[in-house]
Amino acid sequence: MSGPKIDHVELERRRQAEIERLRQERLRRIREETNKLNAEISATTKQVDFINEHLCSLIRSIESKSEMEITIKNIGRVKESHKKKLLRLLEEIVVPTEPDDISIYTHELSSKVKAAVADYLREVAEYEERINDFIRQSEIKPLAGFNSIVEQLAKMEDFDFSFKKTEVKSSKIEPSVKERATKILFDIERLLSSESIQESDMKKLVAIANSIYESAFESGASFEASVVEYGVAKSKTIRSIAVFDEIYLDYYAEYVTYIDLLNKHGKTAIEITPKEKYRFESVEALQHELTFLAKESKKTSMNNYIREQIDDVMQMFGYYTTEEIVFNPNHTGSHFICESESGRPAIHVHVSEKKQIMMQIVATEKSSRAGSHESISGIISESSDLSTEERNQLLLEQGRFCDLHPKIVDELKKRGLKLDAKSRKAPDEKHCKKILRVSSAKSSAAQTEAIAQIIHDPKATQRPDRKKGLKEKRREMK
């Protein structure tokens, strides 16, 4: 006899292993291609630095010569134009989610960068030749490199760690000390600019920078102890950054895969927005989120497989799966409707978080407010709300379903789904129900927000933003 039917479902181990193997293969490819893209992004950043530094020595050699003023201005114009092109490429990066698409994107970025640098070198070549000719004719010796490190430090706009102005109070301080200190401060700045640096390492380096600056540029006291401390801190920070970057590649691949799996059968797509590196306070925090994502992604891939097999089997028996129904934004598992093209009552399927599948014959009615592109919420009408004709039709269909359900179970078993009977209800008027579908963007939005809360730690958005200037970061850490 046939009322609602509940079965416990388990995937065969071989099927589970195959699904996980395919998931891991996709993760590997996303990680691999993302790593290549990151390398290309890093190379692009280096090309920006190259354009910045290119010809600086020559320009400084003749910057006081009025005859070359126009040439120097033209070089500056060309540099600025092509730097903006490269920076625009970096700002506009949108990473695809499919491995093949990431690979194509990487090659496209590489081609654009090479073209931009080639254009720069071609445009600046004539100006470089003019300077070289002027130097040869004027017997000017080109500088060996850039201005001294101390001069560079004085010109930096965003490098003071909230220090005082770079003024040497004591003439007794040896230039070698100043240069050593300045080089270390530049090294610290580079480390602090990494999005992969951890909070503890950042605070340690800032404290060391304070100590080195004060001893080398203000008090004139020995700063050797701070230099030794910096050497230890630098090694630790570099190791931590390397570990963080490796784990972040795994996190990124897991995140993209998980959201793709959630979106596979969802009516309203969840935007793929993995956390930026600087949002994680520590390697431990990153690892914690990676572990969570891996667990949820694996579970979702299994659930998707079950859903897809149910869809296929239902089609074999003349039913097609429609949208997922949300009865309560906080519900667990998934509810969806399988309707018959013949117009007979539908089958309501509920796959629970406890690995149970419930199938029940229901009447359906679509509200005029429901749209094909909107998320659907459902309202269940009880037997007492139905007409006598509706109840009689549902009772008749419940009886027919007792012959159909075993066939559905057999087909699912062929696909690796093991169903163990938990409950079999006889046809009864009390099981006669109707599902009214209404559009409900609010319900879907609530679901999306709930998922976002799980994936993204709300507290993370309150952390200092490492993309800000060093001055702002210093103030926030204080």
Image (cartoon, rainbow, N blue to C red):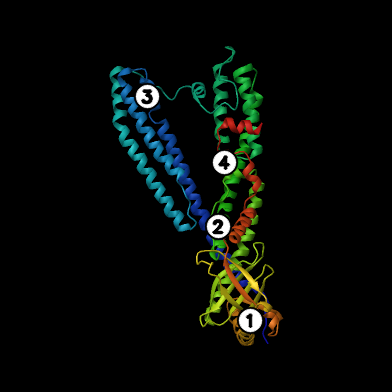
| Three-letter amino acid code at the position of disc 3 | Ile
Is label 1 in a helix, a strand or a loop? loop
- Disc 1 to disc 3, C-alpha distance: 91 Å
- Say which of marks 4 and 2 sits in front: 2
- Say which of marks 2 and 1 sits in front: 1
Where is residue 272 shown, x and y percent of the image?
54, 54
Is label 3 in a helix, a strand or a loop? helix
| Three-letter amino acid code at the position of disc 4 | Glu
- Say which of marks 4 and 1 sits in front: 1
Using the rendered image of the protein, determine whether residue 409 is visible from the camera's viewpoint. yes
First in sequence: mark 2 vs mark 1: 2
Q: Disc 1 designates what residue? A: 387
Q: Disc 2 designates what residue? A: 270
| Three-letter amino acid code at the position of disc 2 | Ile
Is label 4 in a helix, a strand or a loop? loop
The numbered dot on residue 59 is: 3
